Amino acid sequence: MEIDDVELIAKCQAGSVEAFEKLALKYEKQVYTIAYRFMGSHEDACDLAQEALIKAYKSIERFRGEASFKTWIYHIVANVCRDELRRRKKGQLVSLDAPIFTEEGEINRQAEDWTYAPEIVYENKEKQELIQKVLNSLTPEYKEVLVMREIQGFSYEEIAETLECSLGTVKSRLNRARKAMKETLLAKREHFVEGSRLIR
């Protein structure tokens, strides 16, 4: 773990809000990127990235350094996104654009401004949009292992532990997911496959 992270985490656990703000600033773009890959929507990614950072802040006292802070917070954003996708699958989705009702009336939700987030100003936006479109076409199981392995950089063991399945299942899903994504990309835009960081 980076020395800066260790110091900031210690300060966070001692009650420093400023220290957590520095950690959040350091990792917010990566957190957003993961949320975007899971959700495929800028608005959803903004809201869920923010929710993940809030969850991380509230649970920072339980962080024990058994994994890097990056891995820990990536687990949090992945869980937030999976929970949201499960809610949607069950038909219990509340629109992120819907107002919040309070005793004083309606309050419109406001997403944080991510104008300069990596997926918005990415060097090759067209290729990224194509990759995201293909990701969205995959089954949830395939999409999940691809994001965790290729975007989050989790090991096979970490994925298996998180998804509560065997290493064999993880490897099988990942191989099938890569094959499905490669075939779809080849069918759509063959020249976009070359150099894609999701296809190795």
Image (tube, helix red, strand yellow):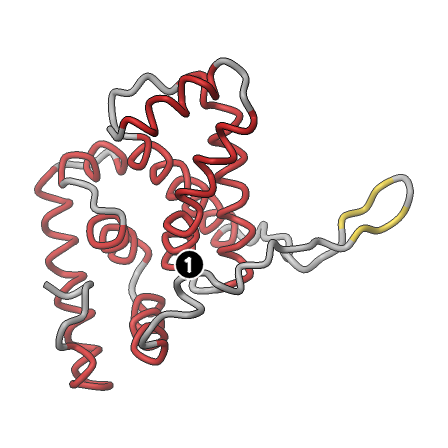
Name the residue beneath numbered marker 1.
36
**Looking at the rendering, in which quadrant would you find the C terminus?**
bottom left
| Left or right side of 18 for 190 | left
Tell me the residue at 40%/40% (across/down). Answer: 79
Q: Where is residue 48 in the image (x, y as percent from the top left)?
A: 51, 48
Which quadrant of the figure contains the N terminus? top left
Amino acid type, residue under disc 1 in the picture? Tyr
Q: In which quarter of the image is residue 154?
A: top left
In terms of depth relative to the viewer, which is nearer, 92 or 98? 98
Q: Position of residue 147 (x, y in %)?
A: 27, 53
The residue closer to the viewer here, 22 or 157, is 22
**Residue at image point 32% right, 72% down:** 128
Residue at position x 36%, y 59% in the image: 37
Q: Position of residue 156 (x, y in %)?
A: 13, 41
Task: Describe the element under mark 1 as helix, strand or loop.
Answer: helix
Identify whether 163 is placed above or below 107: above
Q: In this view, does 25 lie to the left or right of 183?
A: right
Residue 137, image x, y percentages: 33, 70
Residue density around tag 1, few if under 14, some if 14–19, many if 20 or more, within 10 Å: many
